[in-house]
Amino acid sequence: MTLTIALIDDHEVIREGMRRALEREPDIEVVAEAASLAEALTLLRDPLPQVFIVDIRLPDGNGLDFVKQARSVDPDVGLVVLTMYAGDDPLLAALDAGASAFIAKDASTAQMVAAARHAAAAPRNFSAAELAGAIQRRVDPQRPMLSPREAEVLALLADGLGVSAISRRLYISDSTTKTHISHLYAKLGAANRAQALMSAMAQGLLDPPNGSMNGAG
């Protein structure tokens, strides 16, 4: 069976990129698009697509308002929330709104396709890469709030990788990597790599290593 999807994003180039990526899958068809909340709401009529992929920030409102409305119209529609803004707040807001999945705009094509398939198969079972950590930080607000990218950088620092190696692994520039490391040090109250890793382990953000820690800040 064909999986039908509607895209809601105010950037035409982003919609086009998502449409091309999704339609490389032989069983996926993008059947509708909208560039605003008002346009998106007009799509809430029979027959509904199986899945909506919705940007949080729309020019005339919040994509989460659409998620709530769509969920009230059809409890079994798939709703994937898309955002370029990292952090726990948008993720938990998507969960509270009734979304099926939450992904970042820089997610891979495979991650986007997987989120869409999950939303179709289990629309009321929320899926997000950082869900467990976000819920834990909501329960324990004293714990530093790391973005998904910062968590990736932290894990690679723990593996002993330097700036250039981390940049190559994550396909980002050295300056972006240095910015993430700077933010990590600030959140962890650290002045160098060793302090950052010790702080992260003390706060449960990293598992203790089997061997010794290598590398300098």
Image: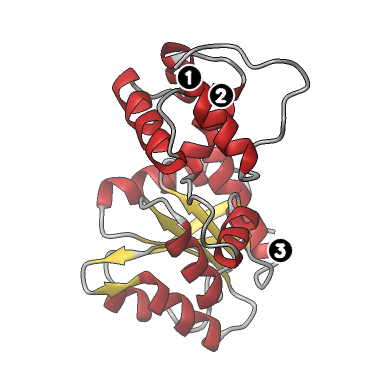
Disc 3, SS? helix
Q: CA distance from mark 3 to mark 2?
A: 33 Å
Disc 1 + disc 3, Cβ < 8 Å: no
Quarter of the rendering containing residue 33: bottom left
Relative vertical location of residue 84 with respect to residue 193 in this rendering, above or below: below
Q: Which mark is residue 166?
A: 1
Q: Which mark is residue 121?
A: 3
Disc 1, SS? helix
What's the residue at 27%, 69% (across, down)? 36
Q: Which mark is residue 140?
A: none
Instruction: Say left or right for 211 vs 54.
Output: right
Q: At which x and y percent is residue 186? A: 37, 39
Disc 2 + disc 1, Cβ < 8 Å: yes
Closer-to-camera residue (207/74): 207
Badge 1 local density, few (<14 within 10 Å), some, or many (20+)? Answer: many
The tag earlier along the polypeptide, 1 or 3, is 3
Quarter of the rendering containing residue 215: top right
Image quarter (top left, top right, bottom left or bottom right) of the N terminus: bottom right
What amino acid does circle 3 point to? Ala
Disc 2, SS? helix
Badge 3 local density, few (<14 within 10 Å), some, or many (20+)? Answer: some
What's the residue at 34%, 18% (across, down)? 174
Closer-to-camera residue (22/111): 111
The tag earlier along the polypeptide, 3 or 2, is 3
- Closer to viewer: mark 3 or mark 2: 2
What amino acid does circle 1 point to? Ile
Instruction: Say left or right for 49 vs 42.
Output: right
What amino acid does circle 2 point to? Leu
- Closer to viewer: mark 1 or mark 3: 1
Identify the residue position indicated by label 2 in the image.
156
Instruction: Say left or right for 13 vs 191.
Output: left
What's the residue at 51%, 46% (across, down)? 22
